[in-house]
Image (cartoon, rainbow, N blue to C red):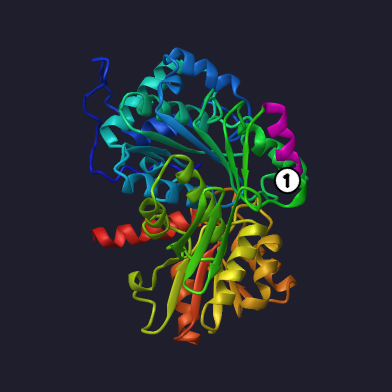
Amino acid sequence: MGPAFAVFGLIAAERYINQENTSLVTTDTSDSILQRMMTLHPKVIDLTLDRVLTLLERLGNPQDKLPQVIHIAGTNGKGSTLAMIRAGLESMGKRCHVYTSPHLVKFHERITIAGEVISEVELAALLDECERLNAGAPITYFEITTCAAFLAFARHKADYCLLEVGLGGRLDATNVIASPAMTVITPISKDHEQYLGNSIAEIAGEKGGILKRGVPCVVAEQVAEASQVIGTLAIERDSPLLQQGEYWTIDSRENQVMYRDQSGQLSLPLPRLIGAHQVVNAGAAVTVLRQLWADDIACVRALRDPQWPARMQSLENYFPEVPVGGEVWLDGGHNEAAGAALAAVLADMPSRATYLICGMLNSKSVTGFLAPLASRISGVTGIAIPQQENAFCGEFVANCAAELGINADSSDNFRTALSRIFSRDRRARVLICGSLYLAGEVLREIKKNDLT
């Protein structure tokens, strides 16, 4: 988890009055409180629900006071699917609380209250309250900040609460909602094996831990091992499955997609989010919306209107290093499945020399990520992710690329790498990728330039 960045120009948080008329006052910024919270547990990740449930009880069990919850797990596509569901619901005039992770530029992005990113004043007050009631007990950064999000959501009215699982599902801090309205499982692949297991079946068991008795679960297309595990869990928990290929299908045709479920057929626009994998995410989102009685217009808006940065986001207009005719794209994908998805995206784009600027955390497989891309790219520049001690150095990334037969070098930072690539090829396509933390650094640089 990276440090938070207070961008609202506030030096200290002001008074915040919650709905119970309790005055909460703190003289700390959210940044300083978050820094302290990082020291409350020796591990960044330590999966269990015990610490979360203890603190939530001290806070008055806010998780039991939320509006209808839609809980989303999976390896890839959680955030994109959530963004589409949100776009569809908000087009109907529904107000949504949203919880996602990690953030890209500032921590506040993780918590959206009834459609608005949480303010610095309210965030600092909530974090202070959680810190005080936790009373120094061991708890991870993600766990205590998840408690703060639930506290925020419980104190504001909304129609829905969209929760993205942080890691896994069964023991994730978000998995404390007794009766969500719906659950969603996006495609499952290998990732975070050190926490979730070394096989797809083990990982699916962790992701499937969000299934609840009697609560329908929308399931995107899965490999056979994952599908079998999810099916078994659904039977054990009496959770109805709305599976792709059985309950619903979605296929792209030229400039549209055709969606079908047991209620009929819809012709929809191609998703605004780029890539064939987004069609699957769109199908899951539309299935959720139709279960919530959304009309056809809301389903169209779900695909047309979502905002989700760092998913094949075009950036060439933001950097002076990029000549006219050059392209720059940003994507936060960081595992083998993401590499395959990006390779498919590049295959569908007009042909031109494509170069990666790649930085990755040392918990990821550089070779696994780059292997699907090898035949689609002309070169890789490896860089270290700034302010991330657990990131690979640029030389290591470059060496992994070279072992795959890819032309590779390394650079000190992405700006230098951009300049070097475009000095060689003014019409190059550059994809900055490998980590959401790297994506956050790039977007932070853009914001810094916009403010100067």
Q: Which sits in the foreground, 150 or 43?
A: 150
Q: Residue at x 35, y 26 (%)?
A: 126
Residue 13: x, y in percent?
Answer: 25, 30
Q: Residue at x 62, y 32 (%)?
A: 211
Q: Residues within 10 Å of mark 1 (few under 14, many from 20)?
A: many
Q: Is residue 229 above or below residue 250?
A: above
Residue 91: x, y in percent?
Answer: 32, 49
Q: Is residue 393 above or below residue 381?
A: above
Tell me if I can see residue 102 in this picture: no
Q: Is residue 74 above or below residue 345?
A: above
Asked if the magenta segment contains residue 235, the reply would be: yes
Residue 428: x, y in percent?
Answer: 49, 82
Q: Which residues are magenta?
A: 228-237
For residue 337, which quarter of the picture? bottom right
Q: Which sits in the foreground, 35 or 147?
A: 147
Q: How many marks?
A: 1
Main secondary structure found in the magenta portion: helix
Tell me if I can see residue 343 in this picture: yes
Task: Identify the amino acid type marked 1.
Answer: Ala
- Classify mark 1: helix, strand or loop: helix
Q: Residue at x 46, y 82 (%)?
A: 422
Instruction: Quickly name the residue at label 1.
Output: 226
Q: Which sits in the foreground, 212 or 195?
A: 212
Asked if the magenta segment contains residue 167, the reply would be: no
